[in-house]
Image (spheres, grey):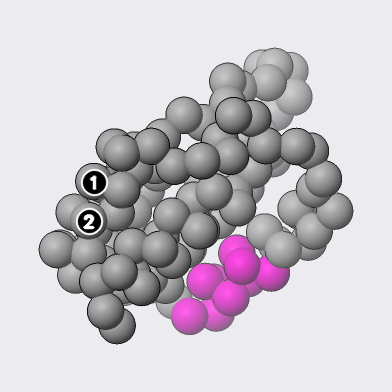
């Protein structure tokens, strides 16, 4: 995959996630570039974003809502963790399915 395609897909995954801004910032593109340079597969990036989003939204409501996500950097730790382990394809598929179900009807407008 070409660099530009990879970067665009990482940013698309990020911006489609819940609680993220409507537009990527320069820093987000820089992080996406670093992921590309490190050879992080898109599947790993997608899995990390899906998993982190689910963790945010399925956490105990007694703790109150979290602040919106301001940068792709929010997901970097999870991406790094996913890059260190062999991901079970069945688990990755399950997380993708849960993400799709959880956020299928999300219609909240993105913030600027």
The residue identified by callout 2 is 33
Mark 1 crowdedness (10 Å alpha carbons): few <14, some 14-19, many ≥20: some
- The residue tagged with tag 1: helix, strand or loop? helix
Q: Is residue 108 left or right of residue 89?
A: right
Residues marked 2 and 1 touching at CB (< 8 Å) = yes
Quadrant of the image for the C terminus?
Answer: top right
Q: Position of residue 69 (x, y in %)?
A: 51, 31
The residue identified by callout 1 is 30
Residue 85 visible in the current orientation: no
**Is 50 rendered above or below residue 69?**
below
Per the picture, the main secondary structure of the magenta-coloured stretch is helix
- Residue under the point 43% across and 55% down: 11
Task: Magenta stretch: give its range.
Answer: 89-97
- Residue under the point 85% across and 53% down: 105
Q: Quadrant of residue 4?
A: bottom left
Q: Quadrant of residue 87?
A: bottom left
């Amino acid at each position: 995959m070409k660099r530009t395609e990879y970067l665009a897909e990482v940013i698309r995954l990020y911006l489609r996630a819940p609680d993220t801004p409507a537009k990527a910032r320069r820093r987000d593109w820089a992080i996406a570039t670093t992921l590309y340079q490190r050879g992080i597969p898109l599947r790993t990036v997608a899995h990390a974003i899906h998993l982190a989003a689910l963790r945010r939204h399925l956490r105990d409501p007694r703790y109150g809502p979290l602040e919106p996500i301001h940068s792709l950097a929010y997901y970097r730790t999870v991406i790094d963790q996913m890059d260190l382990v062999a991901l079970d394809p069945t688990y990755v598929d399950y997380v993708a399915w849960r993400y799709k179900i959880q956020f299928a009807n999300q219609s909240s407008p993105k913030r600027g």
